[in-house]
């Protein structure tokens, strides 16, 4: 006993469609992901699960000097290190956990 089942629409796949997808994929790889602002980087450090009361960070300053510091907090415009130093946030170009 044969049942009449409805026909299913099946689109035709051509090579040009696959080429378009690979070209789009290559374009996505070439795009540069914008870097987070310094304020967002600092916020991410203080909100991370690794931060209890201090965080070891690598700070890159605007003049390309790098500092390895342990930060414990933030005032309005400065980071506070465990050595009671203040590092002005406007002088920082990048900060990351180490």
Image: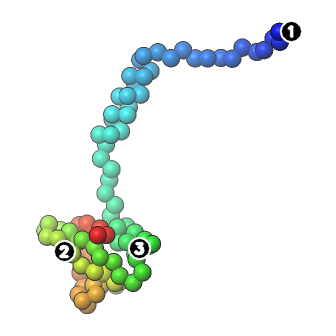
Within-10-Å neighbours for mark 2: few <14, some 14–19, many 20+: few
Q: How many marks?
A: 3
Question: Which secondary structure lies at badge 2?
Answer: strand
Alpha-carbon distance for marks 1 and 2? Answer: 80 Å
Quarter of the image for residue 41 reads: bottom left
Image position, residue 58 (x, y; %): 24, 71
Pick the quarter of the image with the C terminus: bottom left
Q: Do we see residue 17 in this rendering?
A: yes
Question: Which secondary structure lies at badge 3?
Answer: loop
Pick the quarter of the image with the N terminus: top right
Q: Which numbered disc, 2 or 3, marks the residue closer to the eye?
A: 3
Image position, residue 29 (x, y; %): 33, 40
In this view of the protein, which residue sits in the foreground, 6 or 80? 6
Alpha-carbon distance for marks 2 and 3? Answer: 20 Å
Quarter of the image for residue 97 reads: bottom left
Q: Which mark is residue 50?
A: 3
Q: Earlier in the sequence, mark 2 or mark 3?
A: 3
Q: Which of marks 3 and 1 is nearer the N terminus?
A: 1
In this view of the protein, which residue sits in the foreground, 76 or 12? 12
On the image, numbered disc 1 is attached to which residue? 1
Colour pattern of the rendering? rainbow
Q: Which numbered disc, 3 or 1, marks the residue closer to the eye?
A: 1
Image position, residue 59 (x, y; %): 23, 71
Q: Do we see residue 92 in this rendering?
A: no
Identify the residue at image location x=41%, y=73%.
50
Alpha-carbon distance for marks 3 and 1? Answer: 67 Å
On the image, numbered disc 2 is attached to which residue? 67
Question: Which secondary structure lies at badge 1?
Answer: loop
Image position, residue 56 (x, y; %): 29, 76
Determine the residue located farthest toward the bottom in the rendered image.
84
Quarter of the image for residue 16 reads: top left
């Amino acid at each position: 006993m044969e049942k009449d089942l409805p026909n299913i629409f099946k689109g035709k796949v051509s090579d040009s469609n696959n080429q378009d997808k690979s070209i789009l994929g290559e374009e996505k790889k070439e795009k540069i992901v914008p870097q987070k602002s310094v304020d967002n980087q600092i916020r991410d450090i203080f909100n991370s699960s690794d931060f209890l009361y201090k965080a070891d960070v690598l700070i890159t300053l605007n003049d390309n000097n790098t500092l390895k510091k342990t930060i414990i907090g933030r005032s309005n415009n400065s980071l506070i290190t465990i050595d009671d130093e203040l590092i002005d946030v406007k002088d920082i170009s990048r900060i990351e956990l180490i």
